[in-house]
Image (cartoon, rainbow, N blue to C red):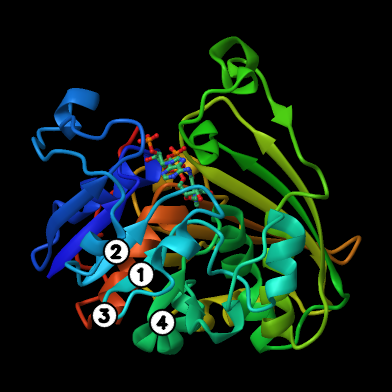
Amino acid sequence: MKVGIVGVTGYTGLELLRILSNHPHVEVTYLSSKSFVGKSLKDVYPFELDETVLQDIEVERFEDCDVLFTALPAGVSYELVKDLKNTKVIDLGADFRFDDPSLYEKHYGKKLSNYETCERAYGLTELNREKIKNAKFVGNPGCYPTAVLLATAPLAKNDALGTSEIFVDAKSGVSGAGRKQDESYTFCELNENLKPYNLVDHRHVPEMEEKLEALFKKKINVVFAPHLIPMNRGILCTIYLKTSLSIEEIHRMYREFYQDEFFVHVLPIGTYPTTKWCLGTNHVFISLTKDERTDTLIVMSALDNLMKGASGQAVQNMNVMFCFEEQTALKFKAVYP
Ligand SMILES: NC(=O)c1ccc[n+]([C@@H]2O[C@H](COP(=O)([O-])OP(=O)(O)OC[C@H]3O[C@@H](n4cnc5c(N)ncnc54)[C@H](OP(=O)(O)O)[C@@H]3O)[C@@H](O)[C@H]2O)c1
């Protein structure tokens, strides 16, 4: 199968290439860049052994691919790919994530033409497999929404959330911001530093709330406090919510919900996840703790933002769409320590 990566020079693009180089059923035939057209990938990243010359973004060439990964800033992909006839698209940005186009418009400041008629599926594999299977366009989820939705979905199925609010304290490695050059991402700004940012109005909030509403069949408000931590990869979300169920009941419910999932692991009560367990892998670790005194459930989820939070999940979705075994090319174990 022929695969293209538009935006291969970014962090998620490179990660896609790393994963796909292990995939027995695909050949990467098209790699594009904006800033390095005409150079080989090896010229830009000497550790890459790939001599393939980076192409300009040419929509005509997209149709040569069976599937195209678009790893571009939000607002760029949609117009490039929306009219493709035969090529399936997995977009790692936000352009295909929303059901409600007005949410995209409000939070990404752009109106997408004919969005209503564009047949798309939200690419959170474990929660939306059936739709992903037949989709032409998959909107791969944001990294934080992946962590939060997987950490709360079992409660939805069992209608076990006591309130309509969840509180999320989130920490992310710096690669979550991409490779962009910006003063606030320089070494001295981030090293030995813990940095809150975009509290409450982070762009991932409307995405989480839209998907939580669909899961819980009621409006759920997300109070969101993200932080950058001085490491390259990894996300740890700590979620506080109310439920009247006992920790044993909740734990059983989560274990049942994810019992057939290869990538989602519900830890024993009293074991807490760390980001290092997921480093370079597509696995997600979830822990459950209940503060009985305040009737508060604390759910933690850890993942690698470039893997299950982006490129790993994108390949998982490709496997679903093309009927390959879902774990194909994704059986990486953590790089540890
Ligand atoms: N980083 C993460 O952990 C993560 C997780 C989930 C989702 N995402 C989403 O995935 C997408 C890619 O993220 P990233 O972290 O890989 O970003 P990145 O490292 O900044 O890379 C961006 C890529 O897009 C290309 N590009 C930039 N502006 C462009 C334009 N106007 N037209 C065409 N190409 C353009 C760049 O090309 P050149 O290098 O050639 O300039 C580069 O290949 C974003 O939408 C991001 O929100 C990222």
- Real-space CA distance between mark 3 and mark 2, rounded to the nearest whole angstrom: 11 Å
Instruction: Respond yes or no on whether mark 4 lies under 8 Å from ligand 1.
Output: no
- Real-space CA distance between mark 2 and mark 1, rounded to the nearest whole angstrom: 5 Å
Q: Which sits earlier in the primary sequence, circle 2 or circle 4?
A: 2
Q: Are marks 4 and 3 in contact (CB under 8 Å)?
A: no
Answer left or right for 186 relative to 3: right
Crowd band around label 3 with a 10 angstrom C-alpha radius: few (<14), some (14–19), many (20+): few
Residue corresponding to mark 2: 68
Residue corresponding to mark 4: 132
Q: Which sits earlier in the primary sequence, circle 1 or circle 4?
A: 1
Instruction: Respond yes or no on whether mark 3 lies under 8 Å from ligand 1.
Output: no
Instruction: Respond yes or no on whether mark 2 lies under 8 Å from ligand 1.
Output: no
Locate residue 80, reporting x and y percent.
41, 61
Crowd band around label 2 with a 10 angstrom C-alpha radius: few (<14), some (14–19), many (20+): many
* Dot 1: element: strand
Task: Say which quarter of the image contains residue 2.
Answer: bottom left
Residue corresponding to mark 3: 86
Residue 329 visible in image = no
- Amino acid found under the numbered disc labelled 3: Asn
- Amino acid found under the numbered disc labelled 4: Ile
Crowd band around label 1 with a 10 angstrom C-alpha radius: few (<14), some (14–19), many (20+): many
Q: Residue at x 34, y 51 (%)?
A: 281
Answer left or right for 108 relative to 301: right
Q: Viewer-nearest of labels 1 and 3?
A: 3
Q: Which sits earlier in the primary sequence, circle 4 or circle 3?
A: 3
- Real-space CA distance between mark 1 and mark 3, rounded to the nearest whole angstrom: 10 Å
Task: Say which quarter of the image contains residue 171.
Answer: top right
